[in-house]
Image: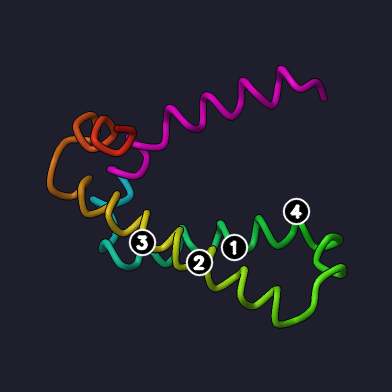
């Protein structure tokens, strides 16, 4: 597939994320939403990078995974908290500032 296709899919998914996250937060508790999104992100990135992981030691992989999880977890926690407290448009504007 061409890179233009991947770029278009990325833009559509990125643009739909606030509305989908707001709907998901209405259906599930904040921490459960956070846990599921972190799990899916981890599994996707692990599947994409499984060949590259052979070049690193277990300690390096654990450190990178821990820091990546912590960064994603905190980012998502604050974003979902903002979505729960305000409209998705307001939360996204503040998020991207």
Q: Which residue lies furthest to the top in this view?
A: 4
The tag on residue 20 is none
Please check the rendered image and state whether residue 2 is part of the magenta-colored stretch, yes or no: yes
Q: Which of marks 4 and 3 is nearer the N terminus?
A: 4
Quarter location, residue 45: bottom right
Q: Earlier in the sequence, mark 1 or mark 2?
A: 1
Q: Is mark 3 on a helix, strand or loop?
A: helix
List x then y, in percent, for residue 73: 41, 63
Q: Are marks 1 and 2 in contact (CB under 8 Å)?
A: yes
Q: Which of marks 3 and 1 is nearer the N terminus?
A: 1
Q: Give the range drawn in magenta.
A: 1-22
Q: Which of marks 4 and 1 is nearer the N terminus?
A: 1
Q: Are marks 3 and 1 in contact (CB under 8 Å)?
A: no
Q: Do the residues labelled 4 and 3 touch (CB within 8 Å)?
A: no
Could you tell me which residue is drawn at 34 percent across and 67 percent down? 32
List x then y, in percent, for residue 25: 27, 52
State whether residue 52 is above or below residue 14.
Answer: below
The tag on residue 69 is 2
Could you tell me which residue is drawn at 27 percent across and 61 percent down? 30
């Amino acid at each position: 597939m061409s890179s233009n296709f991947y770029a278009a899919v990325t833009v559509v998914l990125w643009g739909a994320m606030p509305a989908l996250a707001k709907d998901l937060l209405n259906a599930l508790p904040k921490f459960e939403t956070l846990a599921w999104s972190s799990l899916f992100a981890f599994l996707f990135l692990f599947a994409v990078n499984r060949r590259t992981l052979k070049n690193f030691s277990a300690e390096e992989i654990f450190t990178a995974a821990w820091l990546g999880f912590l960064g994603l977890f905190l980012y998502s926690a604050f974003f979902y908290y903002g979505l729960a407290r305000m409209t998705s448009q307001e939360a996204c504007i503040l998020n991207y500032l």
